[in-house]
Image (tube, rainbow, N blue to C red):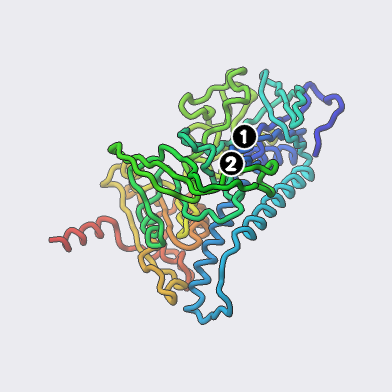
């Protein structure tokens, strides 16, 4: 809904102005509008170096949903291979059409963003595709796409600008490398791909990927990317690009530097960067009004009520310093913030036991503490770790790797073995974990987990059948080596 052009009803143009149209910003705006407040969302993000434009909805629509679609495409390819073991016979050779996938996903991203705009309109939220910069405690300078500037006032401001995917700042990274937001700009399959990433996944996930043909280079960094002489110009079109662009296409020669300083060169079709996000807080006027940020990360310092160092300014989502960042958490905290502001609620967002999922071919989901963090927090003698490999029933006929799927439950012994960490690696891990997250919020103990009746056949039941501890496994390994 376009902003009104008439004079303000009260002392301010709006009750609430939200800078940033990601999941957290949208949530706080919708809830405030439902509570009969006059709300405006400002959202305009610069295109990526490759020209990819983000739709309204932030990373939830522009990268996370895309990753889920691409993961599903991969899983379907594996399912086609497995289908032979279930008696299916293909009359023709099955091949994948990259262009068809790209077109379908691009259209879905546009559709979801359009649906979100209609939803905001139905709630009474005003939306402007424009950049917002704070110039005074209650004043925002709005710069529209055509360059027109104007100033608007609001009783309350919420910063929900999220972050942008980072580059490495090495020669050739912005010219030739992609981030996950740019994948749909490719008119041809990525081909042989180098992924430059910060290593966070467990070794078990890596092992599964290695079995499926992924090579890992450890203790190495990317130092240079250049285009080889055999290249052409590719025209980038479609929903994800601002306008048709001439993009270099050809083999990429990358220089890789090892920890001891040795270098080597290899050629790839695509270089994909996955080195985290940088908060989008540097150009929205925070320093003008004294909003305090962490100097290293640029993220905003907030208290337990999501208040910044300036009274009427709040921050939501991944711009907050020192807090976990997920789409679900941003939506939840944004909704609670609006209710505290306009419904006199006092419920604070609980930033502990926040579930997360990694969309690898064998999915990984976790909630709570890792084994290392639990040991550091409580001390090793007070932590018990139950774990088990499992083989999903649907994997048995095609004889997939028997030791690829794994669960781990981490318990705090003095507190009646309360579950402080839960980790699942296997098909639909995120969906399996979701119900257990609610139980962990209620203080789930190992005894209660053991007393849970599992659904058979099903993979989630493995979590109520854990008897082997990490200590037992280590003792058996030591005994076996003697």
> Rounded to the nearest whole Å, what is the CA distance between mark 2 and mark 1?
9 Å
| Residue found 80% across the figure and 33% down from its top | 3
Callout 2–callout 1 Cβ contact below 8 Å: yes
Quarter of the rendering containing residue 265? top left
**Residue 132 position (above or below residue 406):** above
Residue bearing mark 1:
160
Q: Earlier in the sequence, mark 2 or mark 1?
A: 1
Mark 2 crowd level (few <14, some 14–19, many ≥20, 10 Å Cα): many
Q: Quadrant of the C terminus?
A: bottom left
Residue at the extreme right of the image, as rendered:
6
Residue bearing mark 2:
330
- Image x and y of residue 306, in percent: 57, 31
Residue 354 visible here: no
- Image x and y of residue 74, in percent: 52, 61
Q: Is residue 224 left or right of residue 188?
A: left
Quarter of the rendering containing residue 19? top right
Q: How many marks?
A: 2
| Residue found 52% across the figure and 30% down from its top | 299
Residue at the extreme front of the image, as rendered:
229
- Closer mark to the observer between disc 2 and disc 1: 1
Question: Along the line of sight, which residue is nearer the eye, 139 or 441?
Answer: 139
| Residue found 46% across the figure and 50% down from its top | 268
Q: Quadrant of the N terminus?
A: top right
């Amino acid at each position: 809904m376009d902003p009104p052009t008439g004079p303000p009803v009260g002392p301010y143009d709006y009750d609430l102005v939200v800078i940033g149209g990601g999941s957290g910003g949208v949530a706080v705006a919708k809830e405030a509008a439902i509570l009969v407040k006059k709300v405006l969302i400002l959202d305009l993000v610069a295109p990526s170096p490759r020209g990819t434009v983000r739709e309204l909805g932030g990373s939830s629509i522009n990268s996370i949903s895309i990753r889920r679609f691409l993961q599903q495409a991969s899983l379907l390819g594996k399912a086609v291979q497995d289908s032979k073991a279930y008696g299916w016979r293909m009359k023709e050779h099955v091949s994948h059409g990259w262009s068809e996938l790209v077109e379908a996903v691009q259209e879905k991203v546009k559709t979801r963003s359009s649906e979100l705009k209609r939803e905001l309109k139905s709630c009474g939220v005003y939306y402007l595709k424009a950049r917002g910069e704070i110039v005074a405690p209650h004043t925002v300078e709005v710069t529209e796409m055509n360059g027109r500037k104007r100033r608007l006032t609001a009783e309350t401001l919420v910063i929900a600008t999220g972050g942008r995917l980072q580059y490495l700042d090495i020669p050739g990274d912005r010219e030739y490398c992609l981030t996950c937001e740019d994948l749909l700009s490719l008119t041809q399959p990525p081909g042989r791909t180098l992924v430059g990433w910060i290593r966070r996944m467990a070794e078990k996930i890596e092992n599964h990927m290695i079995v499926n043909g992924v090579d890992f280079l450890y203790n190495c960094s990317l130092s240079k990317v250049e285009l080889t002489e055999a290249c052409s110009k590719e025209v980038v079109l479609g929903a994800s690009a601002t306008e048709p662009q001439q993009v270099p296409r050809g083999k990429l020669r990358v220089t890789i530097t090892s920890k001891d300083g040795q270098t080597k060169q290899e050629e790839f079709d695509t270089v994909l960067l996955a080195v985290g996000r940088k908060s989008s807080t540097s150009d929205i006027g925070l320093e003008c009004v004294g909003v305090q940020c962490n100097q290293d990360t640029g993220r905003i310092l907030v208290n337990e009520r999501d208040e910044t160092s300036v009274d009427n300014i709040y921050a939501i989502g991944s711009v907050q310093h020192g807090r976990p960042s997920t789409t679900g958490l941003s939506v939840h905290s944004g909704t609670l913030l609006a209710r505290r502001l306009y419904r006199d609620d006092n419920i604070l967002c609980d930033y502990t036991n926040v579930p997360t999922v990694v969309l690898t071919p064998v999915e990984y989901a976790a909630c709570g503490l890792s084994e290392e963090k639990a040991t550091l927090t409580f001390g090793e003698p007070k932590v018990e770790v139950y774990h088990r490999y499992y083989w999903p029933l649907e994997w048995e006929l095609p004889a997939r790797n028997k030791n690829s799927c794994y669960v781990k439950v981490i318990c705090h012994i003095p507190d009646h073995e309360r579950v402080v960490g839960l980790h699942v690696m296997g098909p639909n891990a995120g969906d399996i974990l979701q119900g257990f997250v609610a139980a962990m919020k209620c203080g789930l103990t190992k005894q209660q987990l053991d007393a849970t009746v599992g659904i058979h056949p099903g993979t989630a039941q493995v979590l109520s059948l854990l008897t082997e501890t990490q200590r037992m496994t280590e003792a058996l390994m030591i005994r076996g080596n003697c």
